[in-house]
């Protein structure tokens, strides 16, 4: 009866564990260590996202070179469209950096940035806040795309079903906006009480 003294779950779990064979205890410990160590599989994935940053950087400077070399002969509308494309690249790059760093910190290991430049938001984004930031970034990217389509509205309207194309662009953008707002409301309802301000 001493083994069944009241504990955290109504029983003395330490006394009950003494009745288990040591093989199961060792297997449980090994399984837990393997599961915990498997998070490092994500590390090369987050590192691989930096290759996408390199590709975006090349594309950005290609667009920048095109803007500088053709600034005097390019129409104002085309110049604005090119600049909007560059802003779009910057927003996507910022999204990659945010997912890469905060994902690594949340799911793999803490980043030690001592003695180097540090980001003030590093270590402050949990999974819920990261989802909100990603949703807001997607809305911003969608807004830039929609603005580019509005700059080309005359060309779009000349094509067949131009009105429907514009309508679908707006519907898709509003779907992103609605999803971001819904995520914010759900996060506020679920996690705001548990999050330090």
Image: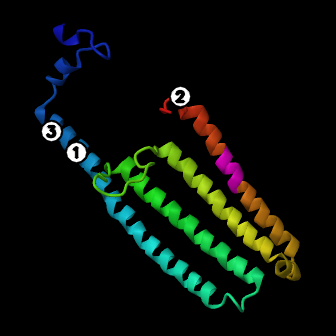
- Pointer 1 residue: 33
Is residue 177 inside the magenta stretch? Answer: yes
User: From the viewer's perspective, is 183 left or right of 166?
Assistant: left
- In the structure shown, which secondary structural element does the residue marked by tag 3 occupy? helix
Residue 26's disc number: 3
Vertical side of 67 occupied by 30: above or below:
above
Task: From the top left corner, tell me how far across and down residue 186 is, in percent.
Answer: 61, 38
Residue at 29 percent across and 55 percent down: it is 40
Q: Which of marks 1 and 3 is in front?
A: 1
Circle 1 residues within 10 Å: few <14, some 14–19, many ≥20: few
Give the extent of the magenta segment. 176-181
- Pointer 2 residue: 193
Vertical side of 83 occupied by 128: above or below:
above
Number of numbered labels in the structure image: 3
Circle 3 residues within 10 Å: few <14, some 14–19, many ≥20: few
Q: Quadrant of the N terminus?
A: top left
Residue at 44 percent across and 43 percent down: it is 124
């Amino acid at each position: 009866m001493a083994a069944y003294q009241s504990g955290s779950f109504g029983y003395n779990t330490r006394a009950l564990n003494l009745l288990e064979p040591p093989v199961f205890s060792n297997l449980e410990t090994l399984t837990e260590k393997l599961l915990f160590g498997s998070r490092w599989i994500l590390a090369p994935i987050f590192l691989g996202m930096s290759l996408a940053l390199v590709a975006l950087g090349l594309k950005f400077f290609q667009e920048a070179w095109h803007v500088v070399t053709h600034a005097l002969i390019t129409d104002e509308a085309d110049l604005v469209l090119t600049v909007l494309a560059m802003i779009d690249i910057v927003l996507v790059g910022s999204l990659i950096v945010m997912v890469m760093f905060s994902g690594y910190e949340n799911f793999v290991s803490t980043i030690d940035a001592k003695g180097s430049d540090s980001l003030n938001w590093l270590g402050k984004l949990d999974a819920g806040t990261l989802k909100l930031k990603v949703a807001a970034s997607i809305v911003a990217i969608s807004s830039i795309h929609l603005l580019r389509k509005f700059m080309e509205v005359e060309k779009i309207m000349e094509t067949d079903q131009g009105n429907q194309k514009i309508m679908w662009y707006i519907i898709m953008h509003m779907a992103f906006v609605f999803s971001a707002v819904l995520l914010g409301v759900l996060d506020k309802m679920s996690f705001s009480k548990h999050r330090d301000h």
